[in-house]
Image (spheres, rainbow, N blue to C red):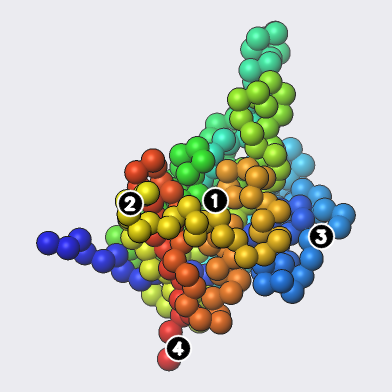
Amino acid sequence: MNAPTPPTLYIEGPAFWTPTLPGWDAARAAFRGEGALSDPPAKRPSPQVLAPAERRRAPDTVALALEVAAAAIAGADRPAADVPCVFTSAHGDLSINDYMCSTLAGDPKMLSPTKFHNSVHNAAVGYWTIGTGCMAASNAVSAYEHSFASGLLEAAVQCAANQEPVLLVGYDTPTVGALTSVTDSRGLLAVAMVIAPVRTGRSVAALQWSLAPHGAAGDDAAATYTSLRSEAAKSLVAINPMAQALGLFESLAHVEGGDEPPLHLQLSPTLSLRLQLRPPPKD
């Protein structure tokens, strides 16, 4: 018996932020070969979801995640308080983790409660739900270098099962201090989108998705994922684990022109998430 085909879902409000492509309009143009990287690179975003004092104290992870989350919700024209959310990050906040380890090793009594508060992996989604008053389900996911694919799978399953839109946010930041000897994460990158169960006027792509064996005969996962088309996307491949999202966002930049080639995002040594974007159907 063949496995049932997962339902087609719809992407709204794609959001993207990295210092050289600070926003989806800039990223979309660069991925289409119609725009250049920002020079000089943009400074860290300042998310308006937070009160001014919290905005100043927020670590990079929170600032990044909330910037793209707000952009995705605005692009989807959805009420943030009502949309369930999945936040995914390979590492959480590496600079705070470095601070925590260094302080605990040197003078544990000097550990900052605020730093400790911001060190937890679900800090960003916590700030989001507080800032927006969101009482819907929220989730924080981590799967190391497969974190974006795992977060996308989680959001798609929730959306399909509950027949309601889900906000997906992915973010990672640079490694600092002693952690550089064990983790290679080089910059700021965050992405977001709303995944909806039905097409709306804000839909930018139809998403077909399924699980597939990774590395099976005929599986061109590695070739497809690494076959980025633009120099802008290629320049970000090594930035941090959230670069796993680049192929999908490059496809989003091109999808209005027709069906995109399938993408395979690795979930584990043996399993991939197969994706195909198509233009949303017209009335």
- Res. 216 mark: 2
Q: Amino acid at mark 1?
A: Gln
Along the line of sight, the residue nearer the viewer: 261 or 126 = 261
Q: Secondary structure at mark 3?
A: loop
Residue at 71 percent of width and 61 percent of height: 231
Residue topped by disc 1: 244
The answer to whether the residue labelled 1 contacts the one labelled 4, judged by CB atoms less than 8 Å apart, is no
Residue topped by disc 4: 282
C-alpha gap between disc 1 and disc 2:
20 Å
The answer to whether the residue labelled 4 contacts the one labelled 3, judged by CB atoms less than 8 Å apart, is no
Q: Specify the quadrant that holds the N terminus.
A: bottom left
C-alpha gap between disc 3 and disc 1:
21 Å
Along the line of sight, the residue nearer the viewer: 212 or 144 = 212
Q: Specify the quadrant that holds the C terminus.
A: bottom left
Residue 83 visible in rendering: no
Q: From the viewer's perspective, is the residue at label 4 or at label 2 nearer?
A: 2
Q: Secondary structure at mark 2?
A: loop
Q: Looking at the picture, how far across and down is residue 196, in whole percent?
A: 43, 68
Which of pointers 3 and 1 lies earlier in the amino acid sequence?
A: 3
Q: From the viewer's perspective, is the residue at label 1 or at label 2 nearer?
A: 2
Q: Left of 54 or right of it: where is 220?
A: left
C-alpha gap between disc 4 and disc 3:
35 Å
Estimate how packed mark 4 is, as few (under 14), some (14 to 19) or many (20 or more) residues with alpha carbons within 10 Å: few
Residue at 39 percent of width and 40 percent of height: 269
Q: Looking at the picture, how far across and down is residue 51, in whole percent?
A: 71, 48
Q: Looking at the picture, how far across and down is residue 63, in whole percent?
A: 68, 46
